[in-house]
Amino acid sequence: MRNATGPSPLLTAVLLAPGALWFLGLLVLPLGVVIVFSFGERAAVGGYQAAFVLDNYLNLPARWTAFKNTLVLAPIGTVVCLIAAYPLAYFLAVKARPETRTALLILVIVPFWTSFLIRTYAWMFILGGRGLPSLIEWAGLGEVRFINTPFAVLLGIVYAYLPLMIFPIYVSLEKLDKRLLEASEDLGASPWRGFMQVTLPLSAPGAVTACMLVFILLMGEYLIPQLLGGGKVFFIGNALVDLFLQSRNWPFGSAVAVSLVVIMLATVSVYMRFAGRIGGARDVSLV
Amino acid sequence: MTAHGAANGTADIEFIDVSKHFGAIAAVDHVDFAIARGSFMSFLGPSGCGKTTSLRLIAGFEQPTTGDVRIAGTSMVGVPAYRRPVNMVFQHYALFPHFNVADNIAYGLRQRRPRPDRAEIARQVDATLDLVRLPGFHARRVWELSGGQQQRVALARALINRPTVLLLDEPLAALDRKLRRDMQIELQNLQREVGITFVLVTHDQEEALSMSDTIAIMRDGRVIQIGSPRTLYDAPANRYVAGFVGESNFFPGEVVAADERGATLKTAAGVVLSAPYPPGGATLVGTARGVIAVRPEMVAMWVGPDDPDGAAEFSCRLGGRVHNRIYLGDQTEYSVATDQFGDVLVRAAKASALEIGPGQEVRLGWRQASGLALVDS
């Protein structure tokens, strides 16, 4: 059998080369550059000047607001997404009739047919002074402001990332063997208890994956705070753009970027350890 | 059809004119029966005959469209599955993959209110694991188990609840033949041990015959005949039952004469055959067509022109040529091509017929009393 010897080393190298080069050139190398830059100094005209100082890291508190916004709104956004997505995914996977299910799934995807930028602009107008607030004022419900508030950013986040949360949960619920719920009921568990003891733990791997996906993307979010936060509610991503393109303080920007990566790695590893404890459910998804 | 203890309170399960429609299709069509307490009952039939729906009506996964389902004398209409005193062993076991063996088995006890304490649950799980001969399997993951072991865990998970009735939905279908045979014996022993009413759904006639006290033969949502395995074998109600329970040669024909005890038919090839009705069977008086069924072991086969002993009593004698031979161990099954009836199946004891092989010209015959005149449906 061919498998006994395996593919030739040359073939292996050829097949691995594109991916390896991609990662090396576009991930590992830039990351190395950023790490090196983060210990440097800002040149007089902006940019980078070689040095080895810790000033950039000691200076991080200057950008405390960006870190705070990101570290507060990203988890909240993830949780709100989860709370909104789970019932929807459950309905789609379990309750919806097969004939209508496809149509409903397409409705979830439809927003992706329009550019993300355009959709976020649309929210800018809806939440802006001549949008919802004017309607509320006209109805005599008082003066409100949505745009450039944490609420607007959160709304944008949930709107944008909801489908991303729905699909992994939908998949895990959809492949759940319905006979397990019959078995649960047969053994004396009410439908609610069956949901808590069977459906929830068995769909947990999907939810864990979805949350991680959304959280990681949220940590690096730039566009939503830029448009709906209007420079008042900004994320680390916005601070980075500002540092690199406006202040041209590359070393400090690099230090912020490295901190973001470190925070993300730390949060995700803690999260994974915690999520791994959600029963043997994680192993189950591999069966 | 016979009813067992329907009126006198010894029935664990009663179906009273039960129908279940899915849209325009009647999966269960005006079915009546009663299952005696502590007995082993099987529903036998091909897929789509309504046997699984009947089981699901008992379990509470389906509600009858019309009629009444009673368990231990109490109407179960509108009672959800989780409030019924029955437990089920599912076809593919439906074990919870996120629990180990012990937690799977304890699931039912943990739903009880008030919930039994830890020690009590542990004690009962131990006892039940012993009962199904899986001691020490507590911490095993269910997907690590073999099919037979999963089967036992499924049994334990149901039995620990001490249900009034245990429902078994094709529980042995996924097992290989040898294991299936062992599990059949084990299930029977277990049923005697725990004294619970067992209701089995199967399409495997051998399984139904070997395990059950009573068998209900179903077709198209209706119960065709209920009886002991012996009754169904010796006195099938019609051709369908005779064909489903054991094997038979069928010779259909026009009824040329019929009285209260038997009938005479003329087959398409012009052969005239007579046979008595099975005990309690329907008469063919006033019927245009009927069928005569002859079990393969009732057909005698010999070589040469000379009739063997007792052949004088044979109502039918004909010649044929063996074209297939299957060893069944203690018996040998021959397929004999005849001009009059096409292929005739003959089953002979091992000792008598070792020298007969394919291509051999043989003669066949059977006693009139060995055949059964049946309704052809």
Image: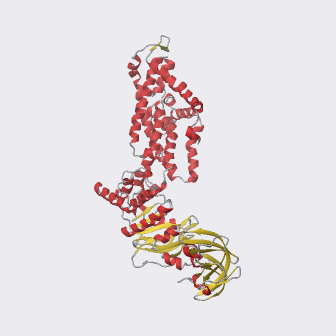
Q: Is residue A22 above or below residue A199?
A: above
At x 64%, y 69%, the residue is: B324
Above or below, A141 against B34 in this view is above
Front residue (pair A135, B120)? B120
Here the colouring is secondary structure
Q: In the displayed image of the protein, which residue is found farthest to the front?
A: B355
B181 to the left or right of B301: left
Residue A167 screen position, x and y as percent:
52, 43
Q: Position of residue B335 (x, y in %)?
A: 63, 72
**Is residue B212 visible in the rendered structure shown here?**
yes
Q: Count the labels in the image.
A: 0
**Residue sticking out furthest to the top:** A44
B375 or A218: nearer the eye? B375
Q: Is residue B89 above or below residue A11?
A: below
B175 to A266, vertically: above or below:
below
Q: Is residue B162 left or right of residue B293?
A: left
Residue A91 coordinates in the image, percent (x, y): 50, 50
The N terminus of chain A: image quadrant: top right
In the rendered image, the residue lying farthest to the bottom is B259
Q: Nearer the viewer, residue B348 or A231?
A: B348
- In percent of width and height, residue B24 lies at 59, 66
Residue B115 in sight:
no
